[in-house]
Every structure is written in C-alpha cells, then in structure tokens.
C-alpha cells in the first residue's frame, strides 16, 4: 500500500468516526424516513391538516397534561421546535398545542407536566376542545412512538471545588508559606522555649 492509499483510508476512517459521533435521534429510522416530507412548522401543519391526514410527523414539546380516557390516553403538548436529535428546544416560542392520542395506557404520573416529549405518529385530524374558557382547535396525532426525555441538569453545577488548585484564600501556600514571601499564611505567635 502506498502512502497516498493509507492517507485516503485514514481520511475515510475519520469521516466515519465523525459522522457516527453526531447527535442521533431516539426516533427509529423507519419513522424518520416516513416523516421526511412533513411541514416545517406546526402552524403550517394545522392549516393543512386534512392534506397531511394519515401521514407520519415528528413533533415535540412540553407536556401540559396527560389523561386516561378509558381505552385511550391523551397527552396535551405545547409544541416546541426540535433540535438535530429531535429533542424539544428550550425556548418561549411555540406554534401552539397538539394532542397525542394513544391507543394504550399512558401513565399520567410518569408523563407529568413540564416534561419534554417527542412524538412520532400519523396525523389524525383536528379536534375542537376547551382550553380554559375558550374553544381551541388541536391538531391530533397518533402515538406510533413516544420518547420522554430525561430531565435536564441545571447549569452551573461544576463537580470540582472553586479553588481546585489548593486550599483557597488565605491558605494558598500553607503550610509552606516560607516559599512565598508575599503572603505568609496564618499568623503564628512567637514560640517561647523553656
């Protein structure tokens, strides 16, 4: 093998490693391929819900509530844009609300308020339902696949102490304060000998 051939194989290997290191979605690839032609926004999807009926979409957002309705379960979600891993982004913008209608039991104690959810399912249509005191037109989506995201860890919890390199002020050089004359360490009184 020549030097050029080994260089090409190294470039191929690096390309494969870099592609495999990208963020991946928890949604199965078959469902992602079926949802490839979905509209970019929930507003557009709601406006043309009849055109997208029985077509696969991937939506996500924050759970408002989950209800068990006898033989089905319903999850009300405030829609958020999805990132490259299909996780709802943390933002205050939304295209509205949608309902995920599941033909199986979804436990409301697990699918709690403010948890992040990604739903892959077929568009079932629109449903008018009460939202507080007003009527609201919800887009209804089936539950072919649900992914409840783990709760995000709060930022700023650095696992190491602030002064990781020593004792911290004023004991940076204690007990070896004679090496650094500008701060002698803790004050010690004179020692009296008997």
Image: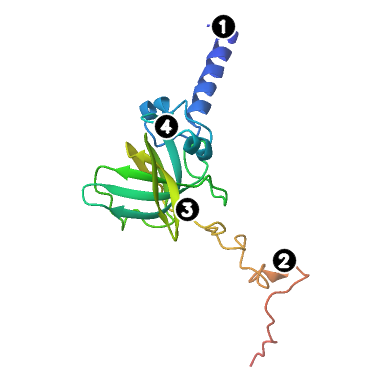
Calculate the distance from the C-alpha at mark 2 to the C-alpha at mark 4.
Answer: 79 Å
Farthest residue in the right direction? 182
Q: Which residue is mark 2?
A: 179
How crowded pointer 2 is (Cα within 10 Å; few <14, some 14-19, many 20+) is rated as few
Q: Which residue is mark 1?
A: 2
The tag earlier along the polypeptide, 3 or 1, is 1
Q: Secondary structure at mark 3?
A: loop
Q: Which residue is mark 3?
A: 152
Decide if residue 12 is on the left or right side of residue 132.
right
Q: Picture quarter containing residue 49?
A: top left
How crowded pointer 1 is (Cα within 10 Å; few <14, some 14-19, many 20+) is rated as few
The tag earlier along the polypeptide, 2 or 1, is 1
Calculate the distance from the C-alpha at mark 3 to the C-alpha at mark 1.
Answer: 49 Å
Q: Secondary structure at mark 2?
A: helix
Residue depth check, mark 4 versus mark 1: number of the one nearer the observer: 4
Residue depth check, mark 2 versus mark 1: number of the one nearer the observer: 1
Say the numbered circle drawn on residue 50: 4
How crowded pointer 3 is (Cα within 10 Å; few <14, some 14-19, many 20+) is rated as few
Evaluate if marks 2 and 1 touch, with contact meaning CB atoms under 8 Å apart.
no
């Amino acid at each position: 093998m020549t030097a050029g051939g080994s260089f090409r194989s190294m470039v191929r290997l690096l390309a494969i490693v870099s592609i495999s290191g990208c963020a991946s979605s928890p949604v199965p690839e078959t469902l992602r391929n079926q949802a490839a032609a979905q509209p970019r926004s929930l507003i557009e999807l709601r406006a043309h819900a009849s055109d997208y009926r029985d077509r696969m979409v991937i939506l996500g957002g924050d759970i408002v509530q989950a209800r068990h309705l006898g033989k089905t379960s319903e999850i009300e979600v405030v829609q958020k844009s999805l990132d490259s891993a299909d996780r709802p982004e943390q933002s205050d913008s939304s295209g509205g609300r949608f309902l995920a209608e599941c033909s199986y039991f979804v436990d409301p104690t697990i699918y709690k308020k403010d948890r992040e959810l990604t739903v892959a399912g077929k568009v079932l249509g629109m449903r008018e339902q009460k939202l507080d005191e007003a009527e609201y037109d919800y887009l209804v989506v089936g539950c072919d696949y649900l992914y409840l995201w783990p709760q995000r860890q709060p930022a700023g919890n650095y696992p190491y102490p602030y002064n990781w390199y020593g004792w911290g002020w004023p004991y940076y050089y204690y007990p070896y304060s004679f090496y650094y004359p500008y701060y002698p360490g803790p004050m010690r009184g004179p020692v009296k000998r008997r």
